[in-house]
Amino acid sequence: MIQIRPISDLRNKFTELEKIVKEGEPVYLTKNGYGSMVVMSLETFADLTNDIEMKLDEADKQAALDDTRYSHDDVFEQLRRHVNGK
């Protein structure tokens, strides 16, 4: 079940939130009724970011093998053509 708590619970009910987070569930914290942040375990965060880190490492290796570089204008123009089917 999604855990949505006021940010004050981070200070006042830390042990309770820690238990939820250690079970693998994120806790969504609100401030003045609006979303403020998400608290999660290091393991959950690592699971979310490991694939990204691997892909960035692969991109760095590929970039080191190829001298071709594109400006942001070139990249976005190619993306626009692809999206628009041209």
Image: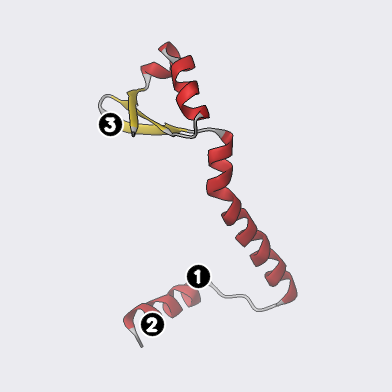
User: Which callout, 3 or 1, points to the residue nearer the camera?
Assistant: 3
Residue 13 % position (x, y)? 42, 14
- For the residues labelled 1 and 2, the Cα–Cα distance comes to 14 Å
Position of residue 54 relative to residue 72, above or below, is: above
Mark 2 lies on a secondary structure that is: helix
- Residue, disc 1: 72
Give me the residue at 34% from left, 34% from top.
2
Amino acid type at circle 2 is Arg
- For the residues labelled 3 and 1, the Cα–Cα distance comes to 34 Å
Give me the residue at 53% from left, 39% from top.
44
- Lower position in the chain sequence, tag 1 or tag 2: 1
Q: In terms of depth relative to the viewer, which is nearer, 31 or 75?
A: 31
Kindly give the residue lying farthest to the right in the view shown: 65
Q: Which mark is residue 4?
A: none
Label 3–label 1 contact, CB within 8 A:
no
- Residue, disc 2: 81
Coloring scheme of the render? Answer: secondary structure
Quarter of the image containing the C terminus?
A: bottom left
Residue 11, picture quadrant: top left
Amino acid type at circle 3 is Tyr
Q: Is the residue marked by circle 2 packed among few (<14), some (14-19), or many (20+) residues within 10 Å?
A: few
Give me the residue at 41% from left, 11% from top.
12
User: Which callout, 2 or 3, points to the residue nearer the camera?
Assistant: 3
User: Which callout, 1 or 2, points to the residue nearer the camera?
Assistant: 2
Give me the residue at 38% from left, 77% from top.
80
Q: Is residue 69 left or right of residue 9?
A: right
Q: Which mark is residue 34?
A: 3
